[in-house]
Image (tube, helix red, strand yellow):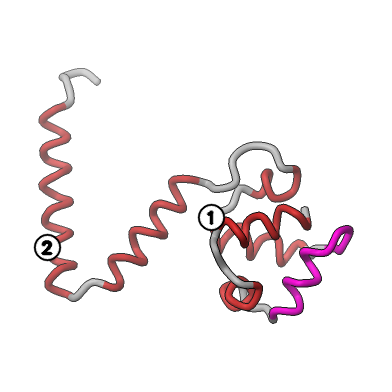
């Protein structure tokens, strides 16, 4: 698991300090977790998975995909949305509703 924590951090392009800040820890805690055979607490596993939309199965065993894709996309979308001005947020909501209407019209009946 220790190598996967490092791999995740590198994939996210975060320093140990940045990674630690996002899950409420200090940089030295991440340094320790990345060391071979270091113990990682349940609380830290849950925090990592929750904050970064990481599959707990992947983190623990290396099996499956690193990220839980739908959660990751949703977090990314909301992070972008929060950075927009109120006017652009309203525009985006309106556009999303238009896209939903268009999608509904494209679906064949009965599916």
- Residue 8 rendering spot, x and y as whole percentages: 63, 56
Q: Could you classify mark 2 by the number of other residues whose Cα lies within 10 Å: few (under 14), some (14-19), or many (20 or more)?
A: few
For marks 2 and 1, give the CA distance.
Answer: 27 Å
Residue carrying label 2: 91
Residue topped by disc 1: 53
Q: Residue at x 40, y 51 (%)?
A: 73
Foreground of the two, 108 or 20: 20
* Image quadrant occupied by the C terminus: top left
Secondary structure state at the residue bearing disc 1 = loop
* Vertical arrangement, residue 77 with respect to residue 29, above or below: above
Q: Is residue 29 magenta?
A: yes
- Residue 7 is left or right of residue 11, and the answer is right
Q: Residues within 10 Å of mark 1 (few under 14, many from 20)?
A: some
Secondary element type, mark 2: helix
In this view, 65 is above or below 34: above
Magenta-colored span:
27-39
Q: Earlier in the sequence, mark 2 or mark 1?
A: 1
x 12%, y 53%: residue: 95
Closest to the observer: 31 or 109? 31
Left-right relation of 74 to 24: left
Q: Position of residue 67 (x, y in %)?
A: 55, 48
Please state which of residues 65 and 95 is positioned toward the viewer in this rendering: 65
Proximity of marks 2 and 1: CB atoms separated by less than 8 Å = no
Above or below, comparing residue 81 to residue 107 in the picture: below
Q: Residue at x 71, y 53 (%)?
A: 4
Location of residue 2 with respect to 23 vertically, above or below: above
């Amino acid at each position: 698991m220790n190598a996967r924590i490092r791999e995740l951090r590198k994939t996210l392009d975060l320093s140990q300090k940045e990674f630690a800040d996002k899950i409420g820890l200090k940089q030295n805690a991440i340094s320790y977790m990345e060391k071979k055979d270091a113990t990682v607490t349940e609380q830290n596993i849950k925090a990592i998975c929750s904050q970064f939309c990481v599959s707990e199965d992947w983190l623990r065993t290396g099996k499956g995909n690193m990220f839980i894709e739908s959660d990751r996309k949703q977090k990314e979308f909301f992070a972008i949305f929060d950075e927009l001005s109120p006017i652009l947020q309203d525009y985006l909501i309106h556009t999303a509703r238009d896209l939903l209407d268009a999608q509904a019209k494209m679906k064949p009946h009965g599916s």
